[in-house]
Amino acid sequence: MESRQSTRKIVSTMQQQFPETPEPLSPSLKQRHLTMLGLGGVIGAGLFVGSGAGIALAGPGIVVSYLIAGALAMLIMRMLGEMSSAIPASGSFSVHAERAFGRWAGFTVGWLYWILLVVVLAVEATGAATIASGWLPGMPQWAWVLLFMVVFTAVNLATVKSFGEFEFWFAAIKVGAIVLFLVLGLLAVLGVLPDTSPVGMSHLTGDGGFLPQGWGGVLAGVLAVVFAFGGLEVVTIAAAESDDPARSVGRAVRSAVWRILLFYVGSMLVVVALLPWDSVRPGTSPYVAVLDRIGVPGAGQIMNVVVFVALLSALNANLYGASRMAFSLAERGEGPKALLAVSGTGVPRFAVIASVAFGFVSVGLNLLWPDTVFLYLLNAVGAVLLVVWSLIAASQLRLRRVLEREAPDRLKLRMWGFPWLTWAALAGMAAVLVLMLTDAAARVQVASCAVLTAVVLAVGLVRERRLRRAASAAPAGE
C-alpha cells in the first residue's frame, strides 16, 4: 500500500508540475539542430587524439573496447530518451531524478552536472588555445582562452537560434571530417587509392594477435575511452527548446546512437587495419598517422583544424547545457532566483553568465600554470560523469514502472529490454568504477569525484530536510 501511494504521489506531482506545456524559453531549435547536436556532441578530441592511448593499451582489441563503452553510452541515451520524451524539460535528467527520488536527487545530479560542464568547457578552451598558440605563437595561451570565452558568451547570450546554427555547422565539420576519413580509410584498406595495396588482416592479427594485451588490455581500453562518450546528454536538454520536445528528442536519440557507434567503431577498425598497433603513441592522433600513411598532404595540420573545431564545438554545447541546467534548477527552487531572468529573445542571460564565469577564471589559471592546468582540471571532475549516468539509470528504473502504470500514453520512446538492460548498464558503470580504482592515475579522479559528490549530496539532503520542516510547520491551508 505504501509503495502504491508513493507511486501515485510521484505521478501526481509529475502531472501537476510538468504538464505538457512549453518551457519559458524560446522554442527556436529545429530538428536538424538537435540531430547534429546529438551526432557532434561526442565527436571530439577524445576520439581524434585520446583514442591513441586506448590503442596503446588494447591493440586491435580497442575495437571491442569501443563496442563495450559505446553500448553502455547507447543504453544510457535510450533511457534518457525515454524519460525526456515523457517529461520534456530543460533540466532533463535532473528533473527525472527529482520526480523519482525527491528534491535531494534532482539537486545533486543537477549541480554535479553543472559543475562538470563548467569545468570541462574551461578544459576545452585550454585545449583549443594550445593548438591556436602553435599557429600564432605571438599570442599567449591565456589570451586565446579569453577570446574564446568572450565570443561564445556572446553567441549564447544572443539567441537560442544562434547557438543552434553555430553548433550545427561546427558539428557538420566534425561529422564531415570523420565520414571523409572513413571513406579514404576504407579505400586504402581495399588498396584502391594510388600507391596502396590491400592490407587484409596483417595488422589486425599479425602483430601479436587481435588481443595482444589480452582481455585485460580490452578492459584498460574501456577505461581509456568510455568518458569520450560524455556529452550526448546535452541533446535531451536542448530538446526542451524545440517546437515539439517529445517528438524531437526521440528522433535525435534514435539517429544519434547507431551513427555514433558507426563513427567510433568504424574509424577504429580503419586505424588498426592500416597501422601496426604498437606504432601508435598515447597523446598523438592515430588519425594523423593514417592520413600520413595514405599520402594526404598536410595531414597533421588538417587534423589540428578538425580537433580545434571539435573543442570549440564542445565548449559551445557545454556552455549551453550548463546554462539550461542552472535555469532549470532555479526554476524548481534549487538555485538562486536571479538565474531565472530571461532576455527578450528567450535566453536565460544570468544563467549563461554564471555558467561561463569559471571559464573566465581559467584565463588566470592559464596565465599562471599554462602547462598543467588542462590535466589538473580534467582530473578534478572526470569521474562525475559516472555518477550522472548512474542516477539516470536509477531514475529510469523507477519512473518507467510509474509511467507504465499511471501514464502509459507518455511513453513515446521505450528503453530496450527493460529492466534487464537497465540493470546491465548499472553493473557496467560499477565495473568501470572498479577499473578506475585499480589504476593509480584514475584513483585521483575517483577521490575527487567522491569528495565533490559527498559535498553536493550533503547540501541537497540538508536543504530538503529544511524544506520539509518548513512545510510541516506552516499553518494548514498555506
Image (cartoon, grey):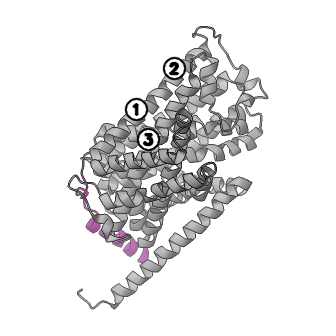
Residue 238 against residue 327 in the figure, above or below: above
Q: Is residue 346 above or below residue 164?
A: below
Which residue is rendered at x = 39% and y = 73% of the image? 6
Q: Would residue 344 appear left or right of 58 to someone viewing this image?
A: left
Q: Where is residue 145 in the image (x, y as percent from the top left)?
A: 48, 47
- Kindly identify the amino acid type of the residue bearing the numbered disc 1: Ala
Badge 2 is on which residue? 183
The crowding category of the residue bearing disc 3, from other C-alpha atoms within 10 Å (few below 14, some 14 to 19, many at least 20), is many
Q: Residue under label 3, please give it.
A: 313
Residue 368 visible in the shown view = yes
Answer with left or right where residue 207 lies relative to residue 198.
Answer: right
Residue 415 appears in the figure: no
Frontmost of labels 3 and 1 is: 3
Marks 2/1: CA distance? Answer: 16 Å
The reply, left or right, for residue 220 in relation to residue 423 is right
Determine whether the residue tagged by mark 2 lies in a helix, strand or loop. Answer: helix
- Res. 91 image quadrant: bottom left
**Farthest left residue in view:** 344
Question: Amino acid type of disc 3?
Answer: Ser
Sequence-first disc among 3 and 1: 1
Residue 435: x and y, percent? 69, 53
